[in-house]
Image (cartoon, rainbow, N blue to C red):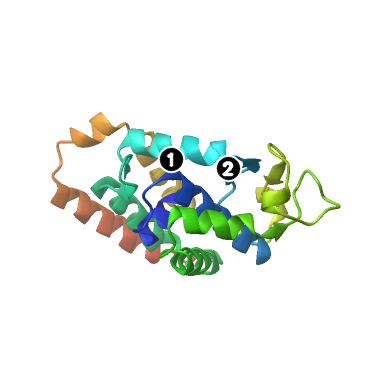
């Protein structure tokens, strides 16, 4: 879903915008009792910050799914999100999660990092570490935990057919050099993805 956010928002040019965009997506998903992004956030210099998100971003960039400095998906990143979304968006209740992330991301797409930071600063939330207090984020003390989504506490979670999940894990485990040096051509990869997608869509989700 992090790749999906980056795909939908072509106006991300730094960590501030990325952090706030994903934070707002998480708040919206929690509001509809859904999951898909499970990053822990605490109050930091520019508002909500997630080390997990930053680590995931760096890992995806190191693997060759993202251009680290431009915050754009590479061809490999586009291939992965296209394959995954095509296979699972209509599987069980996943559609609602994808629609929510797409709508939320596009709502804030035109904002700059500074504009989104100012907007988030002025939002009032109940910090997970201060459950009896509703406060504007700008008034919350530094390093207080703000958000700690838990997969088991939401009703609607992203659901994957087992064979698709295995394919995704294998793709994420492959390092950039291995991907770059694959003997099959890009056309072969596209044909293979199309065959897998057709097989996945033919499986009865029930």
**Residue at 65 percent of width and 49 percent of height:** 151
Q: In which quarter of the image is the C terminus?
A: bottom right
Q: Distance between the residues labelled 2 and 1?
A: 13 Å
Closer to the N terminus: mark 2 or mark 1? 2
Image x and y of residue 77, in percent: 31, 48
* Residue 93, above or below 117: below
Q: Is 159 positioned to the left or the right of 169 in the image?
A: right
Residue 100 on image: x %, y %: 53, 67
Residue designated by label 2: 49
**Residue 21's x, y, as percent?**
50, 55
User: Can see residue 36?
Assistant: no
Where residue 92 sits in the image (x, y, percent)? Answer: 54, 66
Residue 57, label in figure: 1
Image-quadrant location for residue 119 = bottom right
What secondary structure is marked by label 2?
Answer: strand
Q: Which of 92 and 142 is in front in this view?
A: 142
Which residue is at a point 47% across and 63% down the rendered structure image? Answer: 105
């Amino acid at each position: 879903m992090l790749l999906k956010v980056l795909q939908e928002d072509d106006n991300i040019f730094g960590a501030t915008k990325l952090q706030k965009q994903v934070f707002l997506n998480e708040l919206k998903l929690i509001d509809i009792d859904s999951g898909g992004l499970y990053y822990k956030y605490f109050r930091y210099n520019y508002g909500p910050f997630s080390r997990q998100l930053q680590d995931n971003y760096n890992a995806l960039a190191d693997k060759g799914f993202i251009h680290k400095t431009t915050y754009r998906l590479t061809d490999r990143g586009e291939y992965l999100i296209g394959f995954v979304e095509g296979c699972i968006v209509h599987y069980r209740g996943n559609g609602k999660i994808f629609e929510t992330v797409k709508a939320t991301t596009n709502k804030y797409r035109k904002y700059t990092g500074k504009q989104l930071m100012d907007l988030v600063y002025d939002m009032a939330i109940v910090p997970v570490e201060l459950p009896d207090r509703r406060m504007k984020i700008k008034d919350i003390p530094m390093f207080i935990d703000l958000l700690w989504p838990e997969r088991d506490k939401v009703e609607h979670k992203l659901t994957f057919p087992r064979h698709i999940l295995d394919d995704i894990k294998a793709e994420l485990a492959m390092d950039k050099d291995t991907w770059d040096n694959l003997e099959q051509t890009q056309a072969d990869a596209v044909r293979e993805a199309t065959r897998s997608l057709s097989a996945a869509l033919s499986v009865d989700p029930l």
